[in-house]
Amino acid sequence: MNPFAERLKKLRSDQHLSQNALAGFIGVSKSSVNMYERGEREPGFNTVAAIADYFKVDIDYLLGKSEFKNKNEWLQSVHQPIKSEETGVILREDSAAPEIRRLPLLEEVSGGEPVFTPGGRECCLNTGAGVSADFCIRARGDSMQGARIMDGDLVFIRRQPMVDNGEIAAVIVDEDASLKRVYYYPKDEKLSLNAENPRYAPLIYIGEELRHVRILGKAVAFQSRLQ
């Protein structure tokens, strides 16, 4: 069973909620909920966001990308040392030796899909910094300068089909890939892609227009160039 199916079933069971009741709250059929929990069907963008909103959990947790249900739970865990059962020594995450990973650099979109050329350009990530990423994208222009992401910076992306409201994501709209802060409103079936620069108005997509938008993943770190 996939992580989403397991966590959905547990969240529902913990609240003593029937499949039929949950279906009503998130706007799908009971049979759909049943198939989600059995791992027989993958929910769409709208449905996952609605489930996360209903249970007050982060989308990362629902998808098995995080062990923390929400940011409050994560904050409570910060700076908690890990104690070795054998030696009693206090271990910290930064005690691991750094490891450099080479990640593909996204430079092209074709047919609405990211294109990574074998043997193409790469970027390097120090995994000892506690960052998990799958590819990188180079920021273009000044639209994200409010988030300190400048023209030419490398932004590291972790693959996932959606992000929590207010998070920065790599997004494809038709044939164009860019970085935007994402806000999704499931009741209105509305998606707002916001720049971090007041010069640029939000890009709004409603209903059927959502088909033109694809979230590639969450921005987890960036590397700036010296000016």
Image: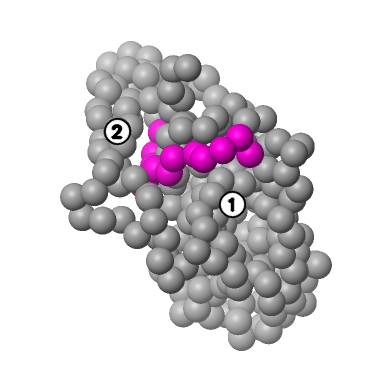
Do the numbered discs 2 and 1 sit on residues whose CB atoms are within 8 Å? no
Residue 135 falls within the magenta-colored stretch: yes
| Main secondary structure of the magenta stretch | loop
Residue lying at the far right of the rendered structure: 188
| Quarter of the figure with the N terminus | bottom left
Q: Is 116 situated above or below 8?
A: above
Report which residue position mark 1 lands on: 163
Give the quadrant of residue 196: top right
Does residue 150 appear in this view? yes
At 38% from the left and 25% from the top, the residue drawn is 129
Q: Is 123 situated above or below 26?
A: above
Residue 8 falls within the magenta-colored stretch: no
Q: Residues within 10 Å of mark 2 (few under 14, many from 20)?
A: some
Question: Which circle marks residue 124 in the picture?
Answer: 2
Q: Amino acid at mark 1?
A: Val
At 81% from the left and 67% from the top, the residue drawn is 188
Q: Element at badge 1?
A: loop
| 91, 193: nearer the viewer | 193
Q: Position of residue 175 (x, y in %)?
A: 50, 64
| 182, 226: nearer the viewer | 226
- Tell me the mark number nearer the camera, choosing from 2 and 1: 2
Q: Position of residue 78 (x, y in %)?
A: 55, 25
Q: Element at badge 2?
A: strand
Q: Residues within 10 Å of mark 1 (few under 14, many from 20)?
A: many
Q: Is 53 situated above or below 201?
A: below
Q: What is the C-alpha distance between the residues marked 2 and 1?
A: 24 Å
Chain-order first, disc 2 or disc 1:
2
Q: Position of residue 171 (x, y in %)?
A: 54, 55
Does residue 9 appear in this view? no
